[in-house]
Amino acid sequence: MPQTVDTSSELFLYSLPLDFYSQLPAKVDAVTIADVERVAKQYFVPGKMFIVAVGDQKKIESGLQSLNMGKIQLTSFDGTPAKTAEASGATQ
C-alpha cells in the first residue's frame, strides 16, 4: 500500500496526467536507437565524464583496462587517493 500511495502522490507532485503510468510502457518502447544516440551526444561529454567501478581490484582491473577509457585512479570511499595493496605492503 505505501508504494501505491507514493506512486499516486508523484502524479500530483510532478503535475503528471492521471494515465501517466499506464502510458509509460508504450512511451519507453517507442524510444529508438537514434533517440538514445541523440541524447547521449547532447548530454554526455567524454572529457568530463567519470566511470565509477566498485569491486575487487584484482578481479576487475584487467577488464577495465581493456576498455581503453583512460587512466584508472584508485580512491577510497571518501575520494582521497587509495593506497594499493602492493604499495602498502598489505596482503589479502
Image (cartoon, grey):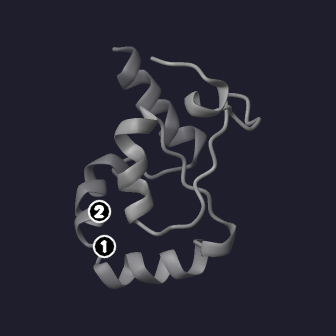
Q: Which residue is mark 2?
A: 28
> On the image, which quarter does residue 30 sit in?
bottom left
Does residue 36 lie above or below 88 as drawn?
below
Amino acid type of the residue that numbered disc 2 sits on in the rendered structure? Val
Q: Nearer the viewer, residue 28 or 8?
A: 28
The spot of residue 21 in percent (x, y) is 32, 47
Q: Nearer the viewer, residue 55 or 88?
A: 88
- Label 1 vs label 2: CA separation? 6 Å
Query: Quick check: 20 left or right of 46?
Result: left
Does residue 53 lie above or below 33 as drawn?
above
Instruction: Please report contact status of discs 1 and 2: CB closer than 8 Å, yes or no.
Output: yes
Q: Is residue 17 visible?
A: yes
Does residue 65 lie above or below 52 as drawn?
below
For label 1, the SS is: loop
Q: What residue lies at 40% left-to-right and 15% top-to-bottom?
A: 2
Q: What residue lies at 50% left-to-right and 31% top-to-bottom?
A: 9
Q: Nearer the viewer, residue 9 or 30?
A: 30
The spot of residue 18 in percent (x, y) is 39, 47
Query: Quick check: 45 left or right of 52?
Result: right
Within 10 angstroms of label 1, few (less than 14), some, or many (20 or more) residues?
Answer: few
> On the image, which quarter does residue 5 sit in?
top left
Q: Which residue is mark 1?
A: 31
